[in-house]
Image (spheres, grey):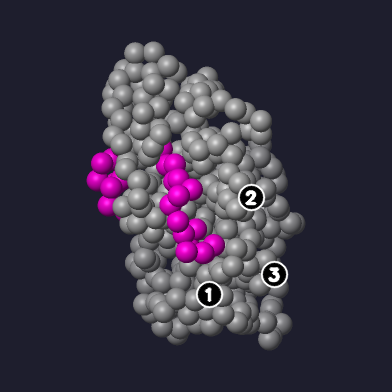
Amino acid sequence: MKRLFPVLALAFPLLLAAQEAPAPLRFRELLRAERQPLRIVCFGDSVTGVYYHTGGRRSYPELIGEVLASHHPKAEITVVNAGASGHTTTNGLARLQQHVLVHRPHLVTVMFGLNDVAKGSLDLYRKNLAEIVEKCRAAGAEVVLCTPNAVAETPARPVAEVAVFAGAARAVARELAVPLCDPHADLGALQAREPEAWRLSMSDEIHPNLRGHRRLAESILTVVEGEPVLLPDDLPVSAPLAFTLTKLRKGEPVRVLAMPPFDTLAGDALREAVPGASVEVVPWPVAGLDRPALMKDASHRVRPLSPDLVVIAVPRSAAARDGEEFIRTQMWIANHSLSYGKRAWDVVVAHPDVSEGAGGEAEKERDELIRQIVPAQDLPLVDRGEGDGRGAGEVFGEWVKQRAAE
């Protein structure tokens, strides 16, 4: 892969003054005691909220809830996601009562900054963060203050400016003796050390995908638990055909939007898995389109249709100019195929090995990239095992049957 997002000099501010150590989290002790219901609210912008960047089902707050439930099985823990796209700390203050304090949280994580860089001012950001912390404390909640995540260079959010705002969040944490989570430094270290791995953790220049959200969850959980927490990069996608199979089992018709050859295969696969299924398949033409054209096509084709299932099968013949364009288009064909907020239909990606057979040496690197990209978006990948010589219909049909049997 020759070119990644433009990553300029990464100026991660060092802590120049000793931080007054905040008191140990009372929440940690309550968590380990497992004696009372506990409530966490994760407060922030689109990086916190559930949107297509992470696959539309979960982001770091939901991951935090899953991990804490696993670590403390007797505890009753509720995690509320209070992220809202486009919001600054000013917007956050305006909705603090109705979206955060109304839940009577024991702990509030606060992660703003990327929109403050684009639309606000540094002084206002510091002032608002301090006010959010004080109001949460006055309501009886502890706070973990988070820096904004590391980004790639864009006109609205220059890398150096985001670093300055991250430094301001650190300063507020020091001044108010608030526990600090520092994803700007954590993800920034990955960005500097392994730029390709960092790129594959990002949906775009500023938003992490689900793989990146695992890193955010690790950072916050390490502060909450008081010891390092590590999460695997990718886990199997649960219930990958949940919307489609639920409707079919109720006897309701489903609409499938599918790229070739699955425009002629998906209907039979679903009817075989659920006898009597009523399936309408809408073809998604791809012939003659390169990857940027397919990405643009996805942006206006899928959401107006509101399908029940989308089958993405980008052919190898759809060209990309370079490695970065390949990554971006693979991610954004899928992003545009998802509903904007929480997932409202199923999206499945078929590897070219399924529809076209094994590629040659020239295709190997990009074929493997697809296997890294799709799980990072919390999407299922239909793939062909080594030595599997079955046709695409058999491979896809067996995959659907297995999902129906789960």
Residue at the (55%, 37%) spot, across then down: 357
In this view of the protein, which residue sits in the foreground, 296 or 166? Answer: 296
Looking at this view, name the residue that lies furthest to the top: 275
Mark 2 closeness class: few <14, some 14–19, many ≥20 residues within 10 Å: few
Residue 79, given in percent of the width and then of the height, sits at: 52, 48
Mark 1 closeness class: few <14, some 14–19, many ≥20 residues within 10 Å: few
In this view of the protein, which residue sits in the foreground, 246 or 104? Answer: 246
Q: Is residue 335 above or below residue 313?
A: below
Q: Which mark is residue 380?
A: none
Mark 3 closeness class: few <14, some 14–19, many ≥20 residues within 10 Å: few
Per the image, the residue denoted by label 1 is 6
Per the image, the residue denoted by label 3 is 193
Q: Amino acid at mark 1?
A: Pro
Image quarter where the N terminus lies is bottom right
Q: Is residue 9 above or below residue 315?
A: below
Residue at the (42%, 16%) spot, across then down: 272
Answer left or right for 169 relative to 14: left
Q: Which mark is residue 361?
A: 2
Instruction: Write the start and end of the magenta stretch as one range.
Output: 299-326
Q: Amino acid at mark 3?
A: Arg
Counting residues from the start of the chain, the first of labels 2 and 3 encountered is 3
Residue at the (52%, 19%) spot, across then down: 405
Kindly state the secondary structure of the residue where label 1 is placed.
loop
Residue 391, given in percent of the width and then of the height, sits at: 52, 27
